[in-house]
Image: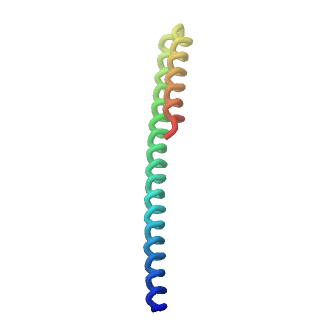
Amino acid sequence: MSDLVRVQSRGLAGRQQGRTLAAVGKETSVRAARVEAKTFVAYSAMQAVAMIGVLEGELIKSVPVAEPRLKMIADAHSFGVADEVMRPW
């Protein structure tokens, strides 16, 4: 009878360990997905800010008198993009 009890207790521990490993695996997958999503958002944000920066420079060369307004619009865009990147997940 004592052998039977030992085998059953190992079985319970094994199942519990399996559940723990499954939970860790799930958490790891969730974290990896969050990292991928944040990377995509940051990459997109940097591209958008760079694109607006290039356009801003071209328009300032074309219409120098509009420089302060163009800078204000570009800065507002950059702040808005940064705000999106910094939002909690």
Q: Position of residue 78 (x, y in %)?
A: 52, 26
Residue found 46% across the figure and 39% down from its top: 41
The quadrant in which the N terminus is found is: bottom left
Q: Position of residue 66 (x, y in %)?
A: 51, 10
Task: Answer above or below: position of 25 versus 62.
Answer: below
Residue found 54% across the figure and 13% down from its top: 67
Task: Say how the picture is coloured.
Answer: rainbow
Residue found 54% across the figure and 17% down from its top: 71
The residue at the far right in this view is: 68
Q: Position of residue 64 (x, y in %)?
A: 53, 11
Q: Position of residue 26 (x, y in %)?
A: 43, 59
Q: How many marks?
A: 0
Looking at the image, residue 72 sits to the left or right of residue 15; the answer is: right
Task: Answer above or below: position of 87 versus 27.
Answer: above
The residue at the far top in this view is: 65
> Residue 45 or 31: which is nearer the viewer?
31
